[in-house]
Image (spheres, helix red, strand yellow):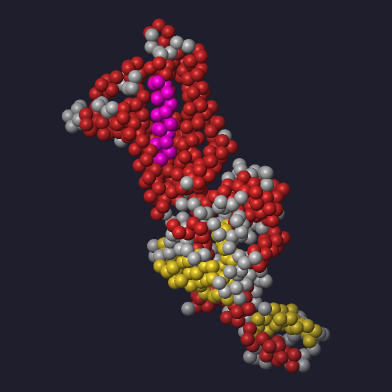
Amino acid sequence: MRPVGIIALRELSDGLRNRRVIATTLLMAALALTLALLGSAPTGTVGVSQLAVTVVGLSSLTVFLVPLIALLIAHDAIAGELDRGTLTLLLSYPVARWQVLAGKFIGHALILAIATVLGYGIAGFALAYASPGWGGEATTAFAAMVGTSVLLGAAFLSLGYLISASVRDPRTAAGLAMGAWLFFVLLYDMALLGVLVADQGRTLTLGVMNVLLLANPTDIYRLLNLTGVSHTSLLAGMAGLADQVRLDRITLFAALVAWIAIPLAAAGVIFARRQI
Amino acid sequence: MNDTVATLEGVSKRYGAHRAVDRVDFSLSAGERVALVGHNGAGKSTLIKLMLGLVRPSEGRVEVLGADPGSRASGAARRSIGFLPENVVFHPSVTGAELLAFYARLKRQPVSRNAALLERVGIADAASRRIGTYSKGMRQRLGLAQALIGRPRVLLLDEPTTGLDPALRQSFYGIVGELAAGGASVLLSSHALAELENTTDRVVVLNQGAIVADGTLGELRRQSDAPTRIRVTLANQSVASCSGLLGNDLACIKVSEQVFEVSCPEPAKLETLRRIIGASLPLSDVAVISPTLDEIYAGFLRREAAQ
């Protein structure tokens, strides 16, 4: 296990050094603060918790931003090091390939977690300071949102690793990573919506719908955050869907964890069999 | 000197129809300095990767320090192997000392010995500078320092002298010599054949994945059909036609007004010299030019191509 820790620490310190962590944290904090302040403007009279509004806004932002950041970090992990020759060197050391993969993943996940928790945490505290009267339920929703954002990031890190372990050229990996982002974040939901409208509920049963939603980590994330709390689901316009979809939080959570574990395991198998 | 540290037996590596390494038999003894010579794509890097277990052989057996380098049991052996890859690009924002500390930890070696390693390769002054500010030669020396962590018993160096100026090359081969004297085996690949004279014990010539020659430089000279040239300078007599001077059976070309060159196979060198001296010519100077490694190499490739 020792090499895993050494490699994870190296990735983390590289991330801190090349200002990736700081840049990501600042970006997330800035966007979160903007949303928080904009969100707090109209709520005074309607009686909806400001934090609930912020959770909805931030969740929608996270779905776009966090997968992008994760894929940007992860796509280079194997293919880039292979291209620079450092992977060949690393594997000549007494280190197993799974240890290289695990160490890098832990390091990158830590980078993402620090940036998310700090970035969103700053916004959360700013909001709490500005309006002290926010409810306990909204606080839980906010904390859950930050936690699931990290998990969503980890799922896309896994996907990025799978891409990076499968191709030889880092530019191919970058292209595929952007393709994966477009597919999961934009195209998938559009296509799903299109099919739903065209089908008019004839063949697409609720069971199929549930599976289709679980097949995309961003949809799992949306269901976890936008339907969890009554206020938020009303605000997000997800109330209708939330009533229909019979997926409890444990299933959703397990599915998100599976989205982390399965692509990472696949990346491990591909990497182990690869000729360097 | 005869304890073998690495053995390859009938090793081939195929990528599709292409044979990157073709039935190679090769062994490396303790304290030996061996050079792998061949043009780009001749299989030098693949051979080194086979010995590191990064590439699995299609057929044959590889053993380094008593273990199959691709197996799980090779962990202990790997701690005694130093490797310098070709064209390695280290992270530009870390310092030399930090990079070396990372690799020392992975090899479970005390980080405190790294300063001495940096001193040894001559970049101790730059230890706390970022690698992005290093020159190509300094990066190459940092790579070498990395390979020296933990006093390895086997050093595999892929093109270690590219980017080094002549003075640095000399100091590099000085380090290689010290390591070999201390019992380490050094296998290095190179394009620059001239620098291998007097710095290596054995030269292995690779062509299209197969070993075409393996021996000391003297042995290679004898095996190769690259001719030895004898340059004769005459005193106050111009060379009209040199075949008229020595007879028609010697290959001979006129170099300048008073200088001509006789080519002969290495074994016939002494006899040819006797003939030149016995030919009662007004000799001013006779110089024997042994074939350089480049010419030997070209000779082997010619012979391979003819077959």
**Relative horizontal placement of residue A204, taking residue A9 as reference (left or right):** left
Q: Which quadrant would residue A23 be assigned to in this image?
A: top right
Q: Nearer the viewer, residue A85 or B29?
A: B29
Q: Position of residue B20 (x, y in %)?
A: 46, 65
Identify the residue shown where x is 69% and y is 78%.
B289
Establish if B153 lies above or below A148: below
On the image, the x and y values in percent for residue A177 come to 42, 40
Residue B41 visible in rendering:
no
The residue segment tinted magenta is: A140-159
Residue B5 part of the magenta-drawn span:
no
Q: How many marks?
A: 0
Is B240 placed left or right of B9 in the picture? right
The location of residue B144, given as percent across then percent down, is 62, 56
Residue at position x 50%, y 26% in the image: A119
> Which residue is farthest right?
B236
> B188 or B77: nearer the eye?
B77
Residue A157 magenta: yes
